[in-house]
Image (cartoon, coloured by chain):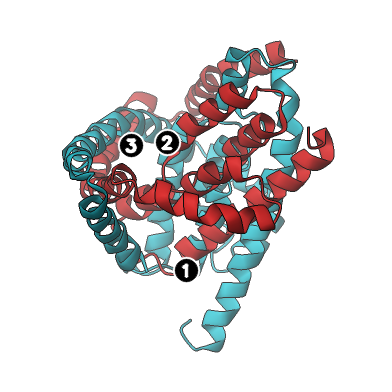
C-alpha cells in the first residue's frame, strides 16, 4: 500500500503540475525537500545519540524493567505476542510515557528502540509483526496531556484562556487511541481469518 | 494553570535525566561508558533513515507544491458541508497525518483568521494537539529498523486519525458550542 501511495503522490503531483502550470513549484519542491529531509536526519542524529545513550543507562540499571513491571497486566493484554519480561515492553512503555508528557524528542529514540526489539522478536525479518502495528496505532494517535505547541500558538494570538483546549484535546486523543486499538484488533482478526497470520 | 504547566514541561526532561543518572550510579552501572556505547547506535540509525525520509518528504512536497492537495481539499468541500463537518478545518484534517509542519502552519493561520476563541480556532487547536503525523511516524520508525512494507500499520494509523478528528469536532462542539 505504501508503494501505491508514494507513487500516487508523485504522479498526481507531477501531472497536476503540468495541467495547472505549477511545474516551477514542483521543481523547486523536489530539491528543497530532499535537502530538508537530509537536514532533518542529521538533526535527529544529535537527539538519537543523546537519548539512546541515556536510555542504555536506564536499561542497564534496571530502571526500564521496573517501569514495565508497573504496567504489566495492561501491556500483556495490549501485546500478547511479546513475552512479559522482554526489553521491548520497557521501551514501548517509556515511549508511550514520553509521548504522553509531550517529550517528542525523547519519544522518537525510545520508539525506534522498541521497534528494534519487536523486529528481533519477529526473527529479524523485514516484515511487519502484529505487535508493531499495535504499537504504531497507539503511537500515531499520540496521547498527550499537555499540547505545548498549540498552547503556545494560542497564547501568541491572545486567547482568553490558552489552556482551555487541553481537556477537549485529552478526550479526543483518548478516543482516537481507543479507536486505534480497536481497529488494530479488527485488522488482526481479519488477517488471522484469511490465514495471513 | 498555564504557569505550572509550562514549569512542569521545562522541568520534566532535566529531572528525568537526573533520575536516570542517579539511579544508574546507585546501581553501579559504568554510566559514561554505557552512555557512549548506547549513543553509537544513534549514528547508524540516523544515516539509515535518510533514504526513507528523503523519499517520503519529496513525494509529499511535490504533491503539495503542485496544488493537487489544495485542489482535492476544495473539491471535497461540498460533500463535507453536507455532513456538517466545518469545511474551514478540512485542509488541516487532511494534512495533519501527512505533514506536521504544514499542519502547524494551517493551525496558526486558522487561529489568526478566525480568532483563538472561535469555534474554528479551538477546533483547529484541538485537532493539531490530539493527532500525530502518521506518515512521518511510520516512515521514521519503520525506516530506522529497515522495514520496507508497512502492512496494515498505515491503514490503522490513518483510521485512528480519522476517529481522532471526528472526536475533536464532537468534543469541541459539546464543550464550547458552535459559536
User: What percent of the width, then of the height, locates residue A93?
Assistant: 57, 46
Q: Is residue A179 above or below residue A99?
A: below
For the point 83% across and 41% down, the residue is B174
Question: At numbered mark 2, what does the secondary structure look like: helix, strand or loop?
Answer: helix
User: What percent of the width, then of the height, locates residue A182?
Assistant: 66, 65
Q: Are marks 2 and 3 on the same chain?
A: yes
Side of A57 where A146 appears, left or right: right
Front: mark 1 or 3: 1
User: What percent of the width, then of the height, locates residue B28?
Assistant: 46, 28
- Which chain has been coloured cyan in this picture? A
Residue underneath mark 3: B38
Question: At numbered mark 3, what does the secondary structure look like: helix, strand or loop?
Answer: helix
Q: Is residue A42 above or below residue A128?
A: above
Q: Residues within 10 Å of mark 3 (few under 14, many from 20)?
A: many
Side of B58 where B106 appears, left or right: right
For the point 50% across and 46% down, the residue is A91
- Which chain has been coloured red in this picture? B
Front: mark 2 or 3: 2
When asked about the image quadrant of residue A42, the answer is: top left
Which one is earlier in the sequence, the residue at label 2 or at label 3?
A: 3
Residue underneath mark 2: B102
Front: mark 1 or 2: 2
Residue B152's label in the rendered image is 1
For the point 52% across and 57% down, the residue is B157
For the point 58% across and 13% down, the residue is A156
Question: At numbered mark 1, what does the secondary structure look like: helix, strand or loop?
Answer: loop
Whether residue B25 is visible here, answered yes or no, is yes
Pointer 1 indicates a residue of which chain?
B
Amino acid at each position: 500500500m505504501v508503494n501505491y501511495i508514494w507513487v500516487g503522490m508523485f504522479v498526481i503531483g507531477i501531472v497536476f503540475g503540468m495541467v495547472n502550470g505549477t511545474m516551477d513549484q514542483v521543481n523547486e519542491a523536489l530539491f528543497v525537500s530532499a535537502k530538508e529531509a537530509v537536514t532533518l536526519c542529521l538533526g535527529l542524529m544529535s537527539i538519537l545519540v543523546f537519548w539512546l545513550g541515556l536510555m542504555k543507562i536506564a536499561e542497564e540499571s534496571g530502571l526500564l524493567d521496573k517501569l514495565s513491571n508497573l504496567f504489566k497486566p495492561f501491556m500483556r493484554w495490549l501485546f500478547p505476542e511479546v513475552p512479559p519480561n522482554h526489553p521491548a515492553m520497557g521501551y514501548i512503555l517509556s515511549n508511550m510515557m514520553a509521548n504522553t508528557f509531550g517529550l517528542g524528542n525523547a519519544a522518537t529514540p525510545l520508539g525506534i528502540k522498541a521497534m528494534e526489539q519487536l523486529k528481533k522478536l519477529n526473527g529479524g525479518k523485514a516484515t511487519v509483526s502484529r505487535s508493531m502495528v499495535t504499537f504504531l496505532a497507539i503511537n500515531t494517535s499520540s496521547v498527550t496531556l499537555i499540547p505545548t505547541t498549540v498552547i503556545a500558538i494560542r497564547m501568541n494570538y491572545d486567547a482568553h484562556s490558552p489552556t482551555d483546549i487541553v481537556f477537549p484535546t485529552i478526550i479526543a486523543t483518548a478516543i482516537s487511541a481507543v479507536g486505534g486499538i480497536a481497529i488494530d484488533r479488527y485488522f488482526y482478526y481479519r488477517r488471522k481469518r484469511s490465514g495471513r497470520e | 494553570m498555564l504557569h505550572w504547566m509550562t514549569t512542569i514541561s521545562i522541568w520534566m526532561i532535566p529531572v528525568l535525566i537526573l533520575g536516570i543518572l542517579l539511579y544508574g550510579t546507585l546501581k553501579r552501572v559504568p554510566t559514561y561508558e554505557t552512555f557512549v556505547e548506547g549513543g553509537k547506535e544513534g549514528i547508524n540509525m540516523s544515516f539509515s533513515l535518510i533514504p526513507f525520509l528523503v523519499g517520503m518528504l519529496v513525494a509529499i512536497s511535490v504533491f503539495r507544491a503542485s496544488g493537487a492537495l489544495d485542489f482535492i481539499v476544495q473539491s471535497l468541500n461540498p460533500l463535507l458541508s453536507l455532513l456538517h463537518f466545518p469545511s474551514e478545518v478540512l485542509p488541516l484534517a487532511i494534512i495533519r497525518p501527512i505533514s506536521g509542519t504544514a499542519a502547524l502552519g494551517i493551525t496558526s493561520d486558522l487561529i489568526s483568521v478566525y480568532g483563538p476563541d472561535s469555534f474554528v480556532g479551538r477546533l483547529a487547536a484541538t485537532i493539531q494537539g490530539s493527532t500525530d503525523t502518521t506518515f512521518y511516524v511510520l516512515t521514521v520508525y519503520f525506516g530506522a529498523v529497515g522495514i520496507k512494507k508497512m502492512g496494515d500499520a498505515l491503514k490503522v494509523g490513518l483510521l485512528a486519525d480519522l476517529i481522532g478528528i471526528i472526536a475533536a469536532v464532537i468534543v469541541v462542539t459539546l464543550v464550547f458550542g458552535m459559536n
